[in-house]
Amino acid sequence: MENKTLLFWNSFKKNIEEVPFNKVLNLNLLYGLNNQLNLLKENTKNFLEGYSYNHALLWGVRGSGKSSLIRGIVQEFAHEYDNFVTLEVNSDDISDLANIFINFEFKKNIILFIDDLSFEQNDRRYIQFKSFLEGSFSNSKYNFLVYVTSNRRHLMKRDMIDNERSSAISQDEGIEEKVSLSDRFGLWISFHNLSKDDFILIVKNYFEYHKLPFHSEIADQAQKWIFARGNRTGRSAYQFFKDYCAKNKIKIS
């Protein structure tokens, strides 16, 4: 198998399938994420070259480029290194991790990618996942790196931790159990809302990348467009760009 595909856990078939790297956003289009990009690249390179590395939690606002950054990086490294596979597991299927690592054989290093992970009230899967990160019997024979994205810093709603403070018999112990999951990640990378200027710069970057003219009128259109949506993110910048191209009958690859 050429290392130009990623592996995906199909929970319905209970099987691992190969998926091509389709529609992965070019890393050059992730404007303003140089710091996050460099941290992830360095960590990934260390993992692939046998140096010390950390599991990473990418947390922050929706649409800020967390998953696009990971997919872009693993695709780029897939063309440079042949000693790893990328396995994507749906966040709803993390209870299958033990099954995956017990019943399937991996001959290469593993980058495990879990997108949009969070836990709700009374969801005990976080205990299983914490055990997995610490190195359980099922995965102990493999060299693996875990990349997780989430909208929540501690992978749980704030009110879950607040409720623990108000109702737990042993408050410190109950809170510690919940927040300790995110502590299993040695690398925390944060993503925040964009300023007005940064949002326009990202829009401009899309126009320049596709060799389309950009001027103040387009910037004004972008500001009016985002006003109705209420959030300035990399995703909404790209959505505006596609909307502009669609309205002006411009084809983009």
Image (cartoon, rainbow, N blue to C red):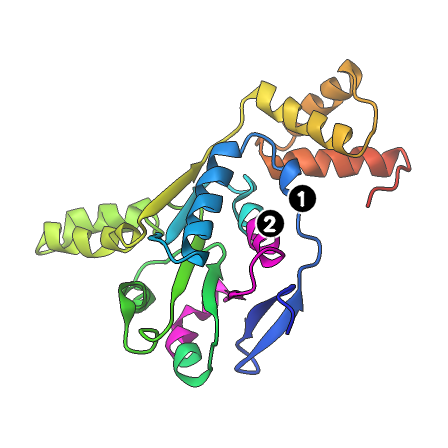
Label 2: which residue?
A: 72
Does residue 231 lie above or below 123 as drawn?
A: above
Q: CA distance from mark 1 to mark 2?
A: 6 Å
* Residue at 67 percent of width and 60 percent of height: 21
Residue 163 position, x and y percent, is 23, 49
Q: Amino acid at mark 2?
A: Gly
Q: Is residue 66 magenta?
A: no
* Residue at 83 percent of width and 36 percent of height: 245
Which of 207/74 is in front?
Answer: 74
Which of 129/120 is in front?
Answer: 129
| Residue 125 appears in the picture as rendered | yes
Q: Answer left or right for 182 relative to 4.
A: left
Q: Amino acid at mark 1?
A: Asn
Q: Which mark is residue 80?
A: none
Q: Answer left or right for 67 relative to 21.
A: left
- Which residue is farthest right? 249
Does residue 169 lie above or below 139 as drawn?
A: above
Q: Is residue 93 magenta?
A: yes
* Residue at 29 percent of width and 67 percent of height: 124
Few, some or many residues within 10 Å of mark 2 (<14, 14–19, 20+): many
* Residue at 48 percent of width and 76 percent of height: 107
How many numbered callouts?
Answer: 2
Label 1: which residue?
A: 26
Does residue 42 lie above or below 214 as drawn?
A: below
Label whose residue precedes the other's in the sequence (1 or 2) = 1
Q: Which residues are magenta?
A: 71-98
Q: Do the CB atoms of the residues marked 1 and 2 lie less than 8 Å apart? A: yes
Residue 77 position, x and y percent, is 57, 54
Residue 206: which quarter of the image? top right
Residue 230 position, x and y percent, is 58, 30
- Which residue is farthest left? 170
